[in-house]
Amino acid sequence: MPESPEPAVAAAARVYDYLLGGTHNYAVDREVAAQMLRAFPMAAVGARYNREFLRRLVRYLTGAGVRQFLDLGSGIPTAGNVHQIAQAEAPGARVVYVDYEPEAVQLGRELLKGNDFATTLQADLRDPDSVYAAHEVRELLDFSQPVAVLLISVLHFVTDDTDAVDLVRRYLAPLPPGSYLALSHLTQAGGRIGALQEESSRVYNKTVSESLAIRDRAQIGAFFTGLDLVEPGLVPLPDWRPVDPGYVPDEEDAPRQVGLCAVGRIPLDKVSDI
């Protein structure tokens, strides 16, 4: 990390960075991660599943012709960022990262120096009006063309269910037909795995500046009301379009059970009532 005072409270983005093997974290973040892993040892694998979903997702979207990405709650830059994947597949693809943590934004800006087609905005994703009004968004994204809104492992920080659904609707409202919503979200597992997950969540909510809302399948599916779900629909993270054609879901894979993801498309014949 850059030389700066050690924070007193862990941050979600830095804990996630540590779980992914990153270096942009402090002792307080590593201690929280260690407590989480003691309660739920599969957390690091779950973080990796989430990152792998993001990579497959961006490749799918660029293959579908998407050239504009709004990555909300993007967090600390780590290997395999959206712009790296999208621009490798489609040079000139445009990406706006949004995060409210100053160090995540600072690191993003350093990473993006010299890249005319990607930028980072410091803003709270819970305020879509401010995000869409920002000059970084208005200058880089063309809302007459499809945009992919990415909410990767971030909506569970919006703990009020009504607010979370309304938030998604407000982000989709100005987008043209053919735009996409992609998200991943923590969900509640059952049995022994669920009990471990609950203990891990208690540790997290006591020690990190953001609390978690773990939603069930129906609640996560509600975010996609009015959208056309891309196959295979709402599924565990590693089950969404796996690279290995011989992949078979492992029902005993604990990290697989605690995260769902999906991708939805605004229908070409539907504009106003998403």
Image (cartoon, grey):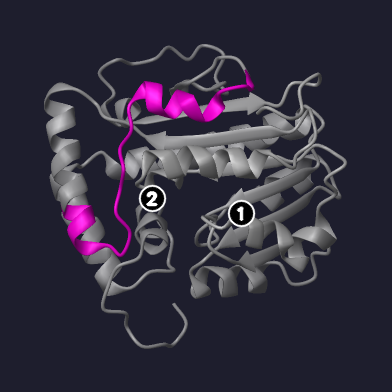
Near mark 1 (Cα within 10 A), the count class, few <14, some 14-19 or many ≥20, is some
- Is-magenta flag for residue 214? yes
Q: In this view, does 213 lie above or below 268?
A: below
> Which residue is disc 2 drawn over?
157
For disc 1, the marked residue is 128
Q: x and y percent of residue 26 in the render?
A: 33, 73
Circle 2 Cα neighbour tier, 10 Å, few/some/many (<14 / 14–19 / ≥20) = some
* Three-letter amino acid code at the position of disc 1: Pro
Q: What stretch is highlighted in magenta?
A: 203-229
- Quadrant assignment, res 40: top left
Mark 2 or mark 1, earlier in chain: 1
Q: Can residue 113 be seen in this view?
A: yes
Horizontal and vertical percent position of residue 25:
38, 69
Residue name at image x 73 percent, y 44 percent: 86
Label 2: element kind:
helix
Residue 32 vs 70, above or below: the answer is: below
Q: Is the residue 248 above or below the residue 105 in the image?
A: above
In the image, taking residue 158 as reference, residue 135 lies left or right, namely right
Q: Quadrant of the C terminus?
A: top right
> Could you tell me residue 16's position as x and y percent?
38, 55
> Three-letter amino acid code at disc 2?
Phe
- Taking 231 as reference, is 31 left or right? left
Secondary structure beneath dot 1 equals: helix
